């Protein structure tokens, strides 16, 4: 049998390499998606832990408004972190249990401040961190391949957006 450009026997010679290439591409894509979801788990955990630590500092060092915001960050991010840990455990994923180096340094710098300097630095850091978190959770809620990570991101994205709006409003006053 003859087709437009190939005989049937010629098509068989191309079929095997193409199949192997598609299988390898699929494996690569699955590995990449798993890496992206693992990266989300890591970043979300480190961000939650940093928010909890910064919130605790705010509860002790901030003015009344900053203390109130800090207390809310501790409560909300502790709840989120506990849920993230449970999802990671269920899926046999190891997540960090401490903030990353950048957050650790920022917390150390924040701890050196007091009064209005502390309040301003805390508010600015929270604004920046929540902008980053909203972007991270938005991406995962739309493009995540891990159902647990995607559901987690979708669930907590509105809370993070609310936090961002709170800090934006507080910075305007």
Image (cartoon, grey):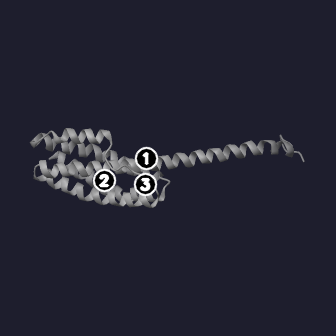
Query: Viewer-nearest of labels 2 and 1?
Result: 1
Is 50 above or below relative to 147? above
Q: Position of residue 32 (x, y in %)?
A: 53, 45
Few, some or many residues within 10 Å of mark 2 (<14, 14–19, 20+): some
**Left or right, residue 57 beside residue 134:** left
Secondary element at image label 2? helix
Q: Position of residue 159 (x, y in %)?
A: 30, 57
Query: Viewer-nearest of labels 3 and 1?
Result: 1
Which residue position is annotated with label 3? Answer: 141
Which residue position is annotated with label 1? Answer: 39
Front position in the image: 98 or 110: 98
Which residue position is annotated with label 2? Answer: 161
User: Pointer 3 and pointer 1: residues touching (CB < 8 Å)?
Assistant: no
Q: Residue at x 19, y 44 (%)?
A: 122
Q: Earlier in the sequence, mark 3 or mark 1?
A: 1
Task: Measure how far apart labels 2 and 1 are at the Cα level.
Answer: 21 Å
Front position in the image: 147 or 161: 147
Task: Measure how far apart labels 3 and 1 are at the Cα level.
Answer: 14 Å
């Amino acid at each position: 049998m003859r087709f437009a450009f190939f005989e049937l026997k010629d098509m068989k010679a191309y079929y095997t390499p193409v199949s192997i290439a598609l299988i390898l591409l699929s494996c690569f894509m699955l590995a990449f998606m798993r890496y992206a979801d693992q990266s989300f788990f890591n970043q979300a955990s480190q961000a939650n832990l940093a928010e909890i630590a910064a919130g605790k500092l705010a509860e002790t060092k901030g003015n009344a408004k900053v203390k109130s915001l800090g207390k809310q960050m501790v409560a909300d991010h502790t709840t989120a972190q506990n849920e993230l840990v449970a999802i990671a455990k269920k899926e046999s994923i190891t997540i960090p249990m401490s903030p990353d180096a950048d957050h650790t340094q920022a917390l150390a710098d924040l701890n050196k401040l007091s009064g209005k300097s502390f309040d301003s630095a805390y508010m600015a850091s929270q604004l920046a961190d929540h902008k980053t978190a909203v972007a991270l959770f938005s991406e995962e809620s739309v493009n995540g391949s891990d159902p647990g990570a995607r559901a987690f991101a979708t669930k907590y994205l509105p809370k993070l957006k609310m936090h961002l709006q709170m800090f934006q409003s507080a910075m305007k006053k």
